[in-house]
């Protein structure tokens, strides 16, 4: 499954001229952090890139969740991410050496170290994006919908994997809801530190897989940004 998000737009929120991702993912500029625009390319284009490019492959595992938090807040979906050894959040996966592995074989090898016996295929492919920065990396994202029981089984298996407690400090479920204070839940989650393209890929996948409405994503980003701004103001002395 390949999804193309090119040509989708932005909207400006309030008078701050802050660009918030509304229909597509362009450049989302925040007061304390930036989610950079990434160029999307097809799998075929990615495979034609020269040896100067590195390939990273990550997997988003998710399940529909009919539960309600406190008996009143719909959970809707459960999405797995992981806390890494460096304190950053990311999706399970890693770099794949294309000299020795196909994308899927390389991804499954890494998943085996951190999750257990789960194996993804080309049918789970979602997108490829070129990353900005000194390193030339094409980031591939795979997504598979599981049942809630299967997702829970992955969580249990991950605790017994080789990398648990070492490179992987544990799986977490993304809270895809916003509480009445407009900060609790997804906005607070977005205020965390993410590795490389993980935050962009999360927002991209939630949109193109129709897991969260565009306006809810925009509101969560705005709330997370406002929280970060207030926290920064408390740390910095007031300007004279």
Image (cartoon, rainbow, N blue to C red):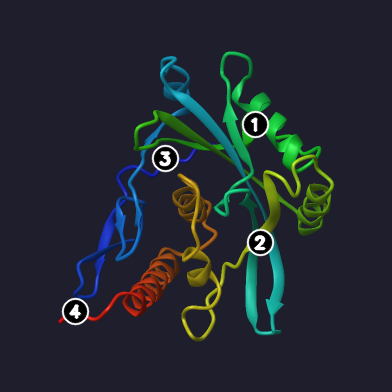
- For marks 3 and 1 on the same chain, the one whose residue lies earlier in the sequence: 3
Depth check: give the residue in front, 159 or 60: 159
Q: Are marks 4 and 2 in contact (CB under 8 Å)?
A: no
Task: Name the residue that disc number 2 marks.
Answer: 173
Query: At numbered mark 1, what does the secondary structure look like: helix, strand or loop?
Result: helix
Res. 239 mark:
4
**Which residue lies under the disc numbered 1?**
107
Quadrant (top left/top right/bottom left/bottom right) for the N terminus = top right
Q: In the rendered view, tell whether residue 51 sits above or below residue 23.
A: above
- Real-space CA distance between mark 3 and mark 1, rounded to the nearest whole angstrom: 22 Å
Mark 4 or mark 2: which is in front? 4
Q: Which one is in front, 64 or 102?
A: 102
| Residue 54 percent across, percent down from the top left | 48, 25
229 relative position to 99: left or right: left
> Which residue is more in the foreground, 202 or 97?
97
Q: Residue at x 50, y 53 (%)?
A: 194
| Residue 141 picture location, percent across and down | 54, 39
Q: CA distance from mark 2 to mark 1?
A: 21 Å
Q: Position of residue 61 (x, y in %)?
A: 66, 49
Tell me which label, 2 or 3, sits earlier in the chain.
3
Residue beneath label 3, please? 4
Left or right for 178, reference 76: left
Of tags 3 and 1, which is closer to the observer?
1
């Amino acid at each position: 499954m390949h999804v193309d998000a090119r040509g989708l737009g932005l909207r400006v929120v309030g008078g701050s001229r802050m660009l918030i991702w509304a229909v597509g993912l362009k450049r989302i500029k925040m007061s304390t952090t930036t989610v950079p625009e990434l160029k999307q390319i097809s799998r075929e284009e990615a495979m034609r890139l020269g040896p100067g490019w590195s390939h990273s492959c990550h997997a988003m595992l998710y399940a529909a969740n009919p539960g309600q938090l406190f008996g009143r807040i719909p959970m809707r979906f459960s999405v797995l991410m992981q806390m890494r050894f460096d304190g950053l959040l990311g999706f399970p996966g890693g770099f794949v050496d294309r000299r020795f592995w196909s994308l899927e074989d390389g991804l499954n090898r890494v998943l085996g170290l951190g999750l257990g016996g789960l194996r993804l295929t080309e049918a789970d492919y979602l997108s490829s994006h070129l990353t900005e920065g000194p390193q030339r990396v094409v980031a591939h994202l795979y997504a598979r919908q599981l049942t809630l029981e299967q997702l829970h089984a992955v969580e249990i298996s991950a605790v017994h994997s080789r990398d648990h407690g070492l490179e992987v400090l544990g799986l977490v479920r993304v809270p895809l809801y916003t509480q009445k204070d407009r900060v609790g839940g997804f906005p607070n989650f977005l205020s965390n530190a993410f590795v490389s393209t993980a935050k962009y890929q999360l927002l991209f996948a939630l949109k193109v897989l129709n897991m969260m409405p565009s306006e809810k994503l925009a509101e969560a980003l705005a709330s997370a940004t406002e929280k970060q701004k207030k926290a920064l103001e408390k740390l910095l002395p007031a300007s004279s």
